[in-house]
Amino acid sequence: MSESRTPSTGPGQQRGATPVGGGTRSGGRRRGPLVGALLVAALVVLALLLSQCGGSDPEAGSDPAAQTSQSAGSPSGPASSDPSSGSAAPSSSGAPAGGSTAGGSVETADGRSVLALAAGPDAGTALGGLADQPVTATGARVLSVPADEGFWLGASDAERMWVQLTGEAGESPYQVREGDLVDLEGTVAPHDAGFPAEVGVDDAEGAQQLAEQAAHLTVAKSSVRLFA
């Protein structure tokens, strides 16, 4: 008859069966989430570093979107008449430059500036080519009145034309005075070197210039009006 022995269950012994590899699987489950969290944190740090590098990139100014916004704010096309450019648009009338607005407008029927021609290097030839052509002055300045029947009209001592008055003044005569702005209609008339003395213009009043210009404006007194 065999004896039945009951295993000892003392403090040093473990009851029941111990699973093989049980401790290893438990440790693996704990390390899995930890490794994943570390990877996510590393990716976040890497993304922050890349974004900081991109914000301080000196090449950022060449971004096409930035260039588009900058070009949208700047005007395009050729600039129109710029006072600082030192160049003026050519006159559509073909008149030489030099007609000053300070002397008003004194022009032929085809738009040529008589004052500009009178101030040119070969005024006698230029004005001689306008002989018998009608001229209209608008807001032209009376520079001086050295004679009873004539006066200088223009912008300066260099840019001026002599006006010789003819005929009657009319019912309400207008007395021309220095500094007045006047409107008038006249005709370019050639003259010889003796003309200044004939109309009472001496050397101090521009006799030499008048002789060199070899032309003046013949204007009826009745056509001279104070510019409004």
Image (cartoon, rainbow, N blue to C red):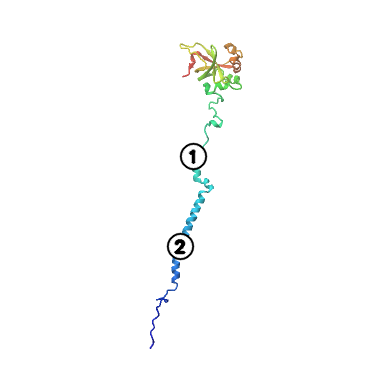
Q: Residue furthest bottom?
A: 1
Q: Tell me where residue 155 sits by quadrant.
A: top right
Res. 153 in view: yes
Q: Looking at the image, is mark 1 or mark 2 nearer the viewer?
A: 2
Q: Nearer the viewer, residue 110 or 177?
A: 177
Which secondary structure lies at badge 1?
A: helix
The residue sitting at 48% across, 53% down in the picture is: 48
Residue 215 vertical position relative to residue 33 in the rendered view, above or below: above
The residue sitting at 59% across, 15% down in the picture is: 204
Which secondary structure lies at badge 2?
A: helix
Q: Amino acid at mark 2?
A: Leu
Q: CA distance from mark 1 to mark 2?
A: 53 Å
Residue 33 vertical position relative to residue 206 in the rendered view, above or below: below
The picture places residue 186, in percent across and down from the top left corner, at 52, 17
Sequence-first disc among 1 and 2: 2
The residue sitting at 53% across, 13% down in the picture is: 165
Q: Residue furthest front?
A: 11
Point out which mark residue 14 bears. none
The picture places residue 227, in percent across and down from the top left corner, at 48, 19
Look at mark 2 in the image and give the residue it sits on: 34
Q: Nearer the viewer, residue 4 or 151?
A: 4
Look at mark 1 in the image and give the residue it sits on: 73
Label 2: how many residues lie within 10 Å, few (<14), some (14-19) or many (20+)?
few
The N terminus: image quadrant: bottom left
Label 1: how many residues lie within 10 Å, few (<14), some (14-19) or many (20+)?
few
The picture places residue 161, in percent across and down from the top left corner, at 56, 18
